[in-house]
Amino acid sequence: MTSYSIIKVGNDYVVQANDKCILKLGSRRRAAQLISDATDLLNAIAVVESPDLSPETPSLAREGSELP
C-alpha cells in the first residue's frame, strides 16, 4: 500500500507517495481530491486483478443470435 501525504512548499502543495514528490498543486483541496481518486483507482485495479474474486464460469448464459 502506498502512503500519500501533502506538504506545503511556499504557496504550493506537494503530493508525496512513499516520501517521493509526485505532484505540485496550488490548492490543498485539489491535492486531497487527487489522492482520493488515485486511491480509489488503485483499489479498483486490485479487485479486478485478484484471481480469487473472479468466477471461473460466467454468471449469465450467453443468448443466441436472433439474426437469420
Image (tube, grey):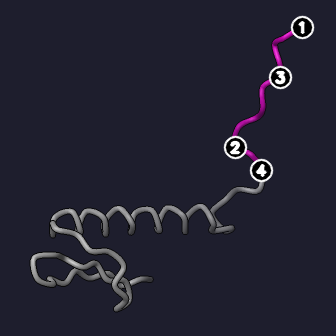
Q: Residues within 10 Å of mark 2 (few under 14, many from 20)?
A: few
SS assignment for the magenta stretch, majority = loop
> Disc 2 versus disc 4: distance between alpha carbons?
6 Å
Q: Residues within 10 Å of mark 3 (few under 14, many from 20)?
A: few
> Disc 1 versus disc 4: distance between alpha carbons?
29 Å
Q: Give the quadrant of the C terminus.
A: top right
Residue holding disc 1: 68
> Disc 1 versus disc 2: distance between alpha carbons?
27 Å
Q: Position of residue 54 (x, y in %)?
A: 67, 59
Q: Position of residue 10 (x, y in %)?
A: 11, 83
Residue that appears at 81% across and 13% down: 66
> Disc 4 versus disc 3: distance between alpha carbons?
18 Å
Q: Earlier in the sequence, mark 1 or mark 4?
A: 4
* Amino acid at pointer 2: Ser
Marker disc for residue 59: 2
In the depicted structure, whether residue 51 falls above or below residue 57: below
Report helix, strand or loop for mark 3: loop
> Disc 3 versus disc 1: distance between alpha carbons?
11 Å
Left or right side of 59 for 21: left
Residue holding disc 4: 57
Residue depth check, mark 1 versus mark 4: number of the one nearer the observer: 1
Report helix, strand or loop for mark 1: loop
* Amino acid at pointer 1: Pro
The stretch in magenta equals 58-68
Q: Earlier in the sequence, mark 2 or mark 3?
A: 2
